[in-house]
Amino acid sequence: MSVAFLGPRGTNSEEAALQFGGENAELKEFGNFAAVLSAVETGIAEYGVIPVENSIEGPVSMALDLLMNETQLMLCAEVVVPIRHVLVGKEGARLEDIRTVISHPQALAQCRRFLDRFMPNAEQVAWMSTGGAVQEVAEGDDPTRAAIGPARAQQLYGGVVLAHDIQDSRSNMTRFMVMGHQDAEPTGDDKTFLAFVIDQNTPGSLHKVLEPFARAGVQLTNVITRPTKGWLGEYYFLIDLEGHRKDPHIAAVLDEVREIADVLKVIGSCPRFPIEQFRELVTPTRGT
């Protein structure tokens, strides 16, 4: 099995790829989400792993937009990875000496509380990936720069850990979608991911699309809106629901929704990830 992921090595995306493909998988790193999907489309890799949602910062907009507008690949699995961030600096660096912190924008946002409290004057600079940020700091020669990333990245590239577990919540997790040319077959415990566009000029149009799901007793587990990148005020609605698109009651609802929505795109169905396995590993820290 070959799996494409957002590189370099040491990112949470690599962890998701390993979790999906196993230790014997051939992992192939790429510089951005679009390249990950293109690798699967062109046969360079069998599967591609991209992050779509974080428990602190919510949707990963860039990835969702690609799924909506720039690929016909289908969701075939999902992976959830607990996220633990460390702050990495050069050997001998002190926290008070850091003037610049670099990382992926999602990681910077997930560590906002730590940065505001302990490094309020440090400039925050976006980087393409967490692993790349750690590599840049570890292999560079500027003792006033630090990077936020996984502990694995520090182990791979060097540098020293200036602070551990700096994410805003210990229950920080990211959901990754595994994309391939076909989605998974039904297992009896599945999820489906889809998107639709409605007529914005018709009162009650959103209710009309959602009503068939409620009538059939279909549980919607997540609803996200994203602009269509066309006319201002036009949106995609992206929905996670319980069940497989081939389940008879789900298929019947989707047929009904196709008649109501302006656009319906079923991105795919896959087995539900058993997220409850992490309950003993993470402890929510609300209000702290």
Image: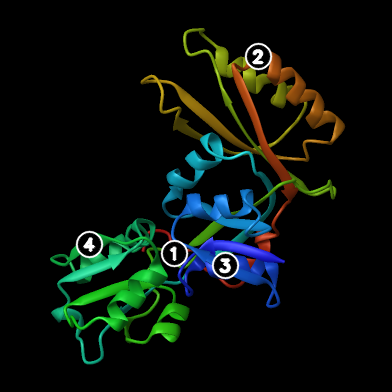
- In primary-sequence order, the first of circles 2 and 3 is 3
Q: Secondary structure at mark 4?
A: strand
Question: Which residue has dot 3 on it?
Answer: 28
Residue 131 on image: x %, y %: 41, 71
Residue 143 on image: x %, y %: 18, 83
Instruction: Please tell me how crowded label 1 is: few (under 14), some (14-19), or many (20+) other residues with Cα within 10 Å.
Output: few
Give me the residue at 84% from left, 50% from top: 187
Name the kind of residue labelled 1 in the image: Thr
The answer to which quarter of the image holds residue 141 is bottom left
Question: Which residue has dot 2 on it?
Answer: 260
- Mark 3 or 1, which is nearer the eye? 3
Instruction: Find out whether the residues at labels 3 and 1 contact each other: C-beta distance under 8 Å.
Output: no
Task: Measure how far apart labels 2 and 3 are at the Cα level.
Answer: 41 Å
Name the kind of residue labelled 4 in the image: Gln
The answer to which quarter of the image holds residue 247 is top right
Task: Measure how far apart labels 4 and 3 are at the Cα level.
Answer: 29 Å
Instruction: Please tell me how crowded label 2 is: few (under 14), some (14-19), or many (20+) other residues with Cα within 10 Å.
Output: some
Q: Is residue 53 visible?
A: no
Give me the residue at 58% from left, 73% from top: 281
Task: Measure how far apart labels 2 and 4 are at the Cα level.
Answer: 45 Å
Q: Residue furthest bottom?
A: 92
